Amino acid sequence: MKKACELKIPFVWTDRRPIILEKFLYIPKAYDFHEQWERTPWSDPRFFGNDRPVALEYCSGNGQWICEKAKLHPEINWVAVEIRYDRARKTWLRLHRDNLPNLFIICGEASVVTRHYLPRESLSKIFVNFPDPWPKLRHAKHRLIQEPFLNDAACLAKPGCEATFVTDDAIYAAQMVEELAKSAAWRPSGKILDGESYGSSFFADLWKKKGYSIHFMDYICHQ
Ligand SMILES: C[S@@+](CC[C@H](N)C(=O)[O-])C[C@H]1O[C@@H](n2cnc3c(N)ncnc32)[C@H](O)[C@@H]1O
């Protein structure tokens, strides 16, 4: 069983750099050299060491949803992207506790990860589950789902890659649809997703308990 202290991240200012340690890619926040990273295929032994399809979840929080998926679908490689170190580390502990060799954790900002760190045309499925809604108008610029991010994500998608966006925030849901319409790569799949079988997460459970409606949007990459 792994302990949190076994994840040795180079936090010291002069030492900090992106680093891969035991199924965990750490990308520092205040760092100017992202473009120096050499993209490596998922078959690299430091990632999965095989060519199975790869599904990636952005904003994975404490990893409840993706760990469950990784258990249920060992035939797929799963990647969790989360900006907060404490949450990414919690997912890493679950990975080792539940012995999930088909899971990899990335601790980094989603736009940076997408633009600089991942192999192009390599993803079979993308999920964005409850990204922060930034409900105040003056903070809306921080929302993740905007055209530049969607275009970068399309570069990582294999042709026919599906992307599912989930939110409890009706305003953000409407904005997602607008931004997706601007990005030529993504078109609605026409699929109606069923919240019951989608899987549970901390925030999905919380919003369901409060009786909030959950918005599911499913798209396909045509690039
Ligand atoms: C509302 S929580 C949802 C967590 C999880 N998906 C769930 O359903 O329980 C949003 C998560 O996205 C993370 N996050 C917010 N902005 C991010 C970004 N730009 N890149 C990566 N993660 C981000 C937050 O740290 C937080 O853990």
Image: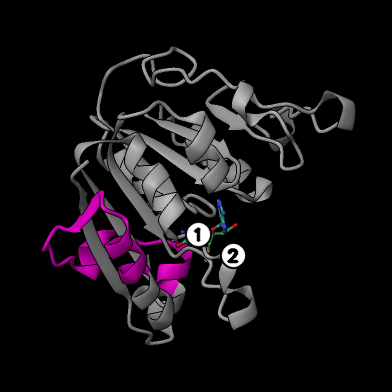
Residue 90: percent from left, percent from top: 59, 45
Counting other residues with Cα less than 10 Å from the Cα at mark 1, is it few (<14), some (14-19), or many (20 or more)? many
- Magenta-drawn stretch contains 147: no
Residue named by callout 2: 142
The residue located at (43%, 75%) in the rendering is 172
Magenta residues, as a range? 176-205
Would residue 138 be found to the left or right of residue 40 on screen? right
Would residue 136 be found to the left or right of residue 100 on screen? right
Would residue 220 be found to the left or right of residue 137 on screen? left
- Outermost residue on the left side: it is 190
Q: Is residue 189 visible?
A: yes
Above or below 29: residue 209: below
The residue located at (25%, 60%) in the rendering is 198
Query: Total number of numbered labels?
Result: 2
Q: In this rendered view, identify the residue nearer to me: 17 or 100.
A: 17
Q: Quadrant of ligand 1?
A: bottom right
Mark 1 and mark 2: Cα distance apart in space: 6 Å
The residue located at (18%, 65%) in the rendering is 193
Callout 1 secondary element: loop
The label on residue 154 is none
- Outermost residue on the bottom side: it is 211
When asked about the image quadrant of residue 145, the answer is bottom left
When asked about the image quadrant of residue 8, the answer is top right
Q: Is mark 1 within 8 Å of ligand 1?
A: yes
Q: Amino acid at mark 2?
A: His
Q: Amino acid at mark 1?
A: Leu
State if disc 2 and disc 1 touch (CB < 8 Å).
Answer: yes
Q: Is mark 2 within 8 Å of ligand 1?
A: yes
Residue named by callout 1: 144
